[in-house]
Amino acid sequence: MNDNKFFVIAIGGTGMRCLESFVHLCAVGLFDDKEINILTLDTDAQNGNKERTESLINLYNTIKKKKGSDDEGNPNHNTFFSAKLNLHSFYTDFGDKDSSRDNYVNLASVPNQEESLKQDNEDLSDLFLEKESVQKFDLAHGFRAQTHLGSMLMYHGIVEAARNVAANKDTARKQDRALIDFLDKMADAGKQARVFIFGSVFGGTGASSIPILPMAFKQAVSIQGKFTLNFQDMKFGTTLLTQYFSFTSPDDNQKKAEKGIIADSKLFPVNSQAALQFYQNDSTVKECYKSLYHVGWPLGTTDYSSTNASKTITGGNEQKNACHLVELLCASAAYDFFNKKDSELTNVDAQYFFHGVEQIPGTNTYNFVGSTFVGGPGYENLADVFTNKLGAFLSFAHVILSKHQAAFSEETHGTKAFIDFLNQNDDILNKYHYEQGISDDEMDEIDKYMRLFAYSVVNSKLQKGWLYQIFDSLNGSNFIFKKDAFESDPARLISKDFDPGNIFVDDAHNWPNESGVLGIGGETSYNKLITILKTKSEPKEQEQRLTTVKEKFLAHLYNAITIAQKFV
């Protein structure tokens, strides 16, 4: 385990969805041995994507916790849920009408200011910010593609939080304390800090924040007086995510009501181009960022229009967009950044990274394989690591959700049923006492995570989770897994014919078949998994850094599936 310390920042709604993919990659075991501090950063405290991702992290941490303890567990090696995540949540609180912070005019007003100085400030604001629209729109749902205003307000929001905490930490707002706690950890890490930022360049909050965050952080840390930030030592990376979704443009009535300040996806390509041109020449970007990953989407935009809304959704709890493959690509960029050798990030100028995807001849579809996401010269083995771990977790989900039917009701306890099934049939598995060492609530938490990762069934209809939504976004392109791996017919999912181990396009990594064992009829790969669990996949406590019965169970299953997939 190296000495680097890892930090992730998600900005705005799109950044939150990239973070959602990142958390799922942590669950599949891609970030072995790492403790990762996460900061969610937004102006919209009620943003639905923010709430969904933070809830996912909290569930992840609940699974990591030791039973009966507030200890959120330790990093593990080569198993599921191997990273330890520490969540810090900050929002700038610019939508509070009760405290007159809901627009720029109110924020910029200074009590007891001399009239001449007040007029000078107003004139300066009017020079750069349109008075009746930009200065007066409601900030509750973020910056709405007004990046010039957003950069200023985000910078000052961070500095304001630092001053609040420095003045009196006990009375400072919870989100302000969370921000400063994150920054203290980052500053304390010094040259060992690797900081990766998720955000888009076509919208408001992400595009506003990426260029100014390092300098805002430096000022906030300086106010605390305990640390300093040295950008020559610290290593920042970020995604430059261009437009990949669209939504219905606001009609004239909504534009009038919002004074014309509302996001319009028709302008996203122009926004992306302008942001990238700015970043290319910005001195802060050049000084602070070591790696910038340019991520785009070749298959046209995905329509995120709400089927139930009569107007364009600007933010708030209603903004809960489906997940998309580009967000997984962004999460994979973080993996690449965290795995780079120190020599690749030391004494180098800002480097831009991108690579193409193989197009299927004669079609508008592409081949997305393991090396699309991770790997490259000097890191070729990472593609197999990625494929193995993502596939192992998908099969794990199918075992719990399909074979033991946890997808169909919260009252159907899939993990418990699976453990009971194993214990009824083999003395070797009994010695681990999984049924005693893992409480019913802990087993149900694993079930819940699997439903969010893959699918659930509500009123006989499949509700698609993260990876199923990722697959849908491919628009017919090839993926690592077969189409059958994303079975959407609930009846088919619980049939004897459905095989959780037959998921890969490359048949070499599908589980081998074995005749019926343990009372299971037929010749299926599921039987082979049970045999491997019994014979050669025992958890390795020291090597995998396991301390709890729950960790041993997860490692035991991870080992068995990996052996069955023949990546070892």
Image (cartoon, helix red, strand yellow):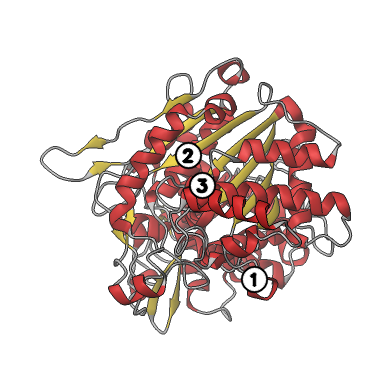
Q: Are marks 2 and 1 in contact (CB under 8 Å)?
A: no
Of the two numbered discs 2 and 1 on the same chain, state the one appearing first in sequence.
1
Q: Name, please, the residue furthest toward the left.
A: 362
Q: CA distance from mark 1 to mark 3?
A: 21 Å
Instruction: Name the residue beneath numbered marker 3.
Output: 208
For image coordinates 78% across by 62% down, the residue present is: 173
Give the mark count: 3
The label number, if any, that marks residue 96 in the structure image = 1
For image coordinates 44% across by 67% down, the residue present is: 314
Q: Secondary structure at mark 3?
A: helix
For image coordinates 48% across by 77% down, the residue present is: 408
Q: Position of residue 49 (x, y in %)?
A: 51, 63
Quarter of the image with the N terminus is top right
Decide: is 458 above or below 47: below
Q: Nearer the viewer, residue 239 or 250?
A: 250
Crowdedness of circle 1 by 10 Å Cα count: few (<14), some, many (20+)? Answer: few
The label number, if any, that marks residue 191 in the structure image = none
- Relative to 185, 236 lies left or right: left
- Relative to 418, 307 lies left or right: left
Q: Secondary structure at mark 1?
A: loop
Q: Are marks 3 and 2 in contact (CB under 8 Å)?
A: no
**Label 3 amino acid?**
Ser
Q: Name, please, the residue furthest toward the bottom.
A: 459
For image coordinates 51% across by 23% down, the residue present is: 350
- Relative to 542, 531 lies left or right: left
Q: CA distance from mark 3 to mark 2?
A: 14 Å
Quarter occupied by residue 515: bottom left
Q: CA distance from mark 2 to mark 1?
A: 31 Å
Instruction: Name the residue beneath numbered marker 2.
Output: 239
Q: Position of residue 327 (x, y in %)?
A: 44, 49
Decide: is 154 above or below 225: below
**Label 1 amino acid?**
Asp
